[in-house]
Image (cartoon, rainbow, N blue to C red):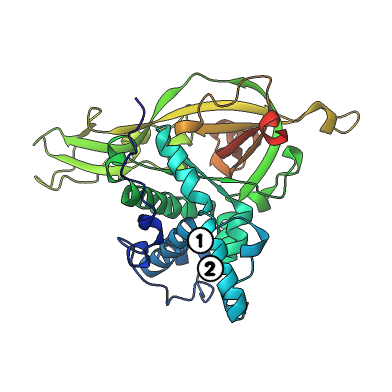
Amino acid sequence: MRREMDGEDEEDDYQDDNLETANFDDDDSVNLEAFDVPLREWIAQTRTRNAIQLKFHKFLHRFREGDEFIVDESELDEAGLKRRRRLEAITPPTYKERIRHMCSSNGAALEVSYVHLMQKFPVLALWIDEAPRDMFDVLNETATRHVLRLFPSYGAIRSLIYVRVADVPIVDSLRDLRRCNLDGLVKVAGVVTRRSAITPKLHMAYYDCVKCKCTSGPIRIDDTTSRSSGPDGNQRDAAESHAPNSCPDCESEGPFRLNSSRSTYRNYQVANLQERPGSVPPGRVPRSKQVIFQDDLVDIARPGEEVEITGVFCSDYDYQLTSRSGFPVFSTYVSANHVRKKEDASS
């Protein structure tokens, strides 16, 4: 069913500066670049998250594509500011149409250009490259709040909006991915050779105490912990490993049972990405890497298609490889954030 948009996309919603920061904490006084702790700890701080959200909200609200808008307003003289205002009056914000098109098609993915973000807020673009998991959590939350402010009833269709980062300028070779790339943003290209069926993956878990029937949760199941393998070589039971230590009602130590009806799940699919034939050095065997597709990205790439995938280069503990090698070994994979087919990139 298509989303009814009439009456919800007035121009004033975008142009009124008094409404621009509605529902966003105005903490723009934070100097994001002045920190002396690890980046992930800095992003996790409340004031930092608020400042990131405010900047990204302003980016979605104000950014306009074009050479005329690249120069910062502080560097313009009075005549330049007047010319900028005239251009802004006749040029709609770039992401206004993208959000409108996403909502009209009942979508959940907002494609954001890495190049646009680098032009407007370079620090956010650099942090996406260095700490993508943490930044995606903040940006997804901001995009969701931004869309719901514009179209309040859209929450009945999509509970979360996913920010998909496109146009990353550097393409990494599958055979060149190394330890320095772990937990960072990478862009790889290749041919999809096979893919699995779509399965539900536990995302937010609720647990029932067997003794008093009290329900605890929600507890978020991280991607890394849900993939780690146990002594039998299979993936650990993510539900069991995230169960509470004690019941908040009867204070007993369990046992606890997963409440599957209240828990939420994500679409989950595994694919294999292999180097393109023309990119393999002479005499070498094509290398491949496992890619994880989740949510709206499942089934987006079919076997035989040539794609560019932007995502997070992740690792997890592999018990089978460890037992054979005699020392801890981690297998690696790419958790996809954005997928572009070759024909889409050339069009």
Instruction: Identify the image quadrant of the C terminus.
Output: top right
Label 1 residue SS: helix
Q: Which mark is residue 89?
A: 1
Left or right: residue 283 compared with residue 49: right
Q: Which residue: 35% across, 32% down?
A: 3
Q: Crowding at label 2, few (<14), some or many (≥20) Cα neighbours within 10 Å?
A: few
Q: Indicate the position of residue 290 as horizontal and vertical percent values.
A: 61, 31
Residue 161 seen anywhere in this rendered image of the structure: yes
Left or right: residue 191 compared with residue 240: right
Up-down: is 264 above or below 147? Answer: above
Q: Which residue: 56% across, 55% down?
A: 128
Left or right: residue 102 compared with residue 215: right
Check contact, mark 2 vs mark 1: CB within 8 A: yes
Up-down: is 9 above or below 289? Answer: below
Q: Crowding at label 1, few (<14), some or many (≥20) Cα neighbours within 10 Å?
A: few
Label 2 residue SS: helix
Q: Nearer the viewer, residue 73 or 202?
A: 73
Q: Indicate the position of residue 285 as horizontal and vertical percent values.
A: 81, 27
User: Separation of disc 2 and disc 1 at Cα?
Assistant: 6 Å
Left or right: residue 259 compared with residue 185: left
Q: Nearer the viewer, residue 44 or 331?
A: 44
Q: Indicate the position of residue 123 as horizontal and vertical percent values.
A: 57, 65
Q: Indicate the position of residue 179 as horizontal and vertical percent values.
A: 67, 50
Q: Nearer the viewer, residue 15 or 115?
A: 15
Q: Which residue: 42% across, 55% down?
A: 138
Residue type, mark 1 in image: Ala
Residue type, mark 2 in image: Arg
Determine which residue is flagged by label 2. 85
